[in-house]
């Protein structure tokens, strides 16, 4: 499984992309975030406030119950801030 | 049509291209977003001056979301043409970030669709702004008011 991190999540995790092989019990986005948070202090810091973390699975917005599988691309990022001036 | 690019764009040329050779368009509405050199008053952030920003995006998903947002606008309003151009990379104050344009037979459709596109784009397209301020680099936080603006287009 490929995991991508954007904006400040990348800074806290310390990488923009990693390939992981979570155990069988990790079948949903929520379970994946729990598992990722335990990988390093940086991961834990990035994921400590889940309200600030958006998730896309294969480039589609996902929720905590969205299934994840071995060949998925999962992206973690903060709420979007595109467009003109806020 | 949607485009995601590092380079600037020529507003006049883009708008002209949208209506070139057409005689069925009665109104063309556009919105241009620019880099501003000050923080929103009352945003909670400190008021350090902004020297520029870097726009990061999620290549692949960005194009996909912009295409979906444009398709939704075309489902809701009878548009003759539509355009979204969004830049990424390093931008200085005064530079253009985004151009949204909608052409329709009637002005109200063009104006509403244009407003819808920019509201939805802000909350649904995967872009993030890193401001370069006096106090150092700072990721811009999303605003609840942006969600409210996007939500006013939600269907009941």
Image (cartoon, coloured by chain):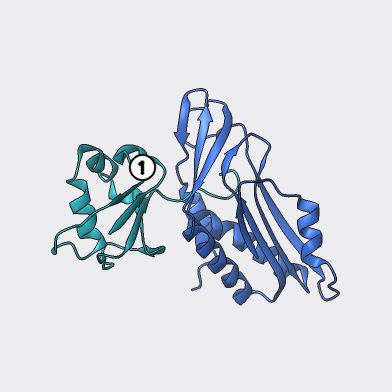
Chain colours: A cyan, B blue
Which part of the image, by quadrant, shows the N terminus of chain A? bottom left
Determine whether B80 is above or below A58 in the image: below
Q: Is residue B62 left or right of residue A9?
A: right
Number of numbered discs on residues: 1
Q: Position of residue B76 (x, y in %)?
A: 61, 75
Q: Position of residue B47 (x, y in %)?
A: 52, 27
* Quadrant of res A65: bottom left
Q: Is residue B108 left or right of residue B68?
A: right
Q: Judge whether residue B40 can be spotted in this image.
A: no
In this view of the protein, which residue sits in the foreground, B20 or A1?
A1
Q: Callout 1: few (<14), some (14-19), or many (20+) C-alpha neighbours within 10 Å?
A: some
Q: Chain of mark 1?
A: A
SS class of the residue under badge 1? Answer: helix
- Which residue shows up at 42% across the image and 50% down it? A79
Determine whether B71 is above or below A1 in the image: below
- Which residue shows up at 62% across the image and 62% down it? B2
Q: Position of residue A58 (x, y in %)?
A: 38, 64
Q: Is residue A22 left or right of residue B83?
A: left
Determine whether B32 is above or below B84 in the image: above
Q: Judge whether residue B97 can be spotted in this image.
A: yes
Q: Is residue B77 left or right of residue A86?
A: right
In this view of the protein, which residue sits in the foreground, A60 or B37?
A60
Furthest toward the top, the residue is B134
- Which residue shows up at 27% across the image and 62% down it? A64
Q: Position of residue B28 (x, y in %)?
A: 77, 64
Which part of the image, by quadrant, shows the C terminus of chain A? top right
- Which residue shows up at 80% across the image and 53% down it? B12
Q: Which residue is mark 1?
A: A10
């Amino acid at each position: 499984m490929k995991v991508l991190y954007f904006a400040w999540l990348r800074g806290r995790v310390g990488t923009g992309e990693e390939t992981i092989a979570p155990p069988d019990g990790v079948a949903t986005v929520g379970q994946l975030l729990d598992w990722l948070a335990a990988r390093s202090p940086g991961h834990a810091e990035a994921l400590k406030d889940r309200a600030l973390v958006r998730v896309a699975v294969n480039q589609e917005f996902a929720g905590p119950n969205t299934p994840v599988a071995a060949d998925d691309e999962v992206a973690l990022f903060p709420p979007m801030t595109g467009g003109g001036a806020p | 049509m949607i485009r995601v690019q590092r380079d600037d764009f020529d507003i006049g040329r883009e708008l002209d291209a949208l209506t070139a050779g057409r005689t069925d368009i009665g109104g063309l509405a556009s919105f241009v977003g620019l880099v501003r050199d000050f923080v929103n008053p009352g945003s909670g952030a400190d008021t350090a001056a902004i020297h520029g920003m870097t726009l990061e995006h999620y290549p692949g998903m960005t194009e996909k979301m912009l295409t979906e947002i444009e398709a939704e606008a075309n489902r809701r309003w009878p548009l003759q043409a539509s355009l979204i151009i969004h830049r990424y990379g390093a931008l200085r104050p005064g530079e253009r970030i985004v151009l949204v344009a909608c052409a329709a037979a009637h002005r109200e459709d063009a104006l509403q669709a244009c407003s819808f596109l920019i509201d939805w784009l802000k909350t649904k397209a995967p872009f993030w702004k890193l401001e370069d301020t006096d106090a150092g680099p700072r990721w811009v936080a999303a605003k609840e008011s942006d969600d409210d603006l996007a939500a006013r287009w939600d269907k009941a």
